Image (spheres, grey):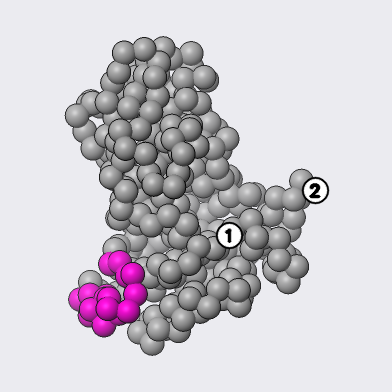
Amino acid sequence: MASWSAKWPAPAKINLMLRITGQREDGYHLLQTVFQLVDWCDWLTFHPVQGQQVGLISPIPGVPEKTDLTVRAAKLLQQKTGCQQGVLIEIEKNLPMGGGLGGGSSDAATTLMALNALWHLGLSQEELMCIGLQLGADVPIFVLGHAAWAEGVGEKLKKIEVEEKWLLIIKPDCHVDTKAIFSVKDLTRDSKPITIAGFISGQHQNDCLDVVRKLYQPVQDALDDLAAFSKARLTGTGACVFAQFDSKSEAQKTFELLRDKWQVYLAKGINRSPLQDMLN
């Protein structure tokens, strides 16, 4: 039973693979990617208010309240359903912004799913995913709440099971402009599509990697330092890079060696979102 007093998780994601297989006439790129969720979360609390007001308890510095994805998600849910209820949203922001971990999209998805329950709207997961897509291409994966193989522009999702390994994630001191990366002339846009079996067999390339590391030296430096301990990879267009480890102790040891130089986080890849456990 959904409760107004609950704290709702908004987990991060990583891209375990990203291939760009083409480009549509409208400019959007056709992708193949694998999303895995991470047990590292923002936490949201929702407070009922009189009337239809939607706002934040404490706006995030640098993000105008009206453009915050949680506010936009709540208002879009009101618009789509005719809901007359309002809400104030409280965000405990743990995930770094602009790192390719999907924090804003995850916050929006948690808002949609929590308010669907708290406002007793009765929308299906599929309906919430469609609403989420209007807010951003990554929102549906967080509504789905499960590791997934994705195609199209990232909206065609199929649940899969991947190894739940320990992660070390570095957030370099830079912000990667996703739109700029997808506009670079030299970006690979014609990768041959693969199958899920191809990914499982080890085809884990990220077609954005070469462009990002050429344009952003901090990303290259982070990749170099992490590669001394395990295979270093870029999530999405970055800026965050990550490496997988078989054991927590191995990841913890590497964390201790890198923590003085980098903004580094220890987490674990998960296949099922903790948000699903709250709702079921």
Asked if residue 264 is positioned above or below residue 79 in the image, the reply reads below
**Image label count:** 2
At horizontal 62% and vertical 69% (from top left) the residue drawn is 207
Residue 244, horizontal then vertical, whole percent = 36, 72
Crowding at label 1, few (<14), some or many (≥20) Cα neighbours within 10 Å? Answer: some
Q: Is residue 262 magenta?
A: yes
At horizontal 52% and vertical 19% (from top left) the residue drawn is 79
Residue 266 appears in view: yes
Q: Quadrant of the N terminus?
A: top left
Give 25 or 221, whichever is nearer the viewer. Answer: 221
The amino acid marked with disc number 1 is: Asp
Residue 50, horizontal then vertical, whole percent = 31, 13
At horizontal 47% and vertical 25% (from top left) the residue drawn is 75
Crowding at label 2, few (<14), some or many (≥20) Cα neighbours within 10 Å? Answer: few
Q: Earlier in the sequence, mark 1 or mark 2?
A: 2
* SS label for mark 1: loop
The amino acid marked with disc number 2 is: Glu
Give the residue at mark 2. 25
User: Which segment is the magenta one?
Assistant: 249-266
* SS label for mark 2: loop
Q: Is residue 59 magenta?
A: no
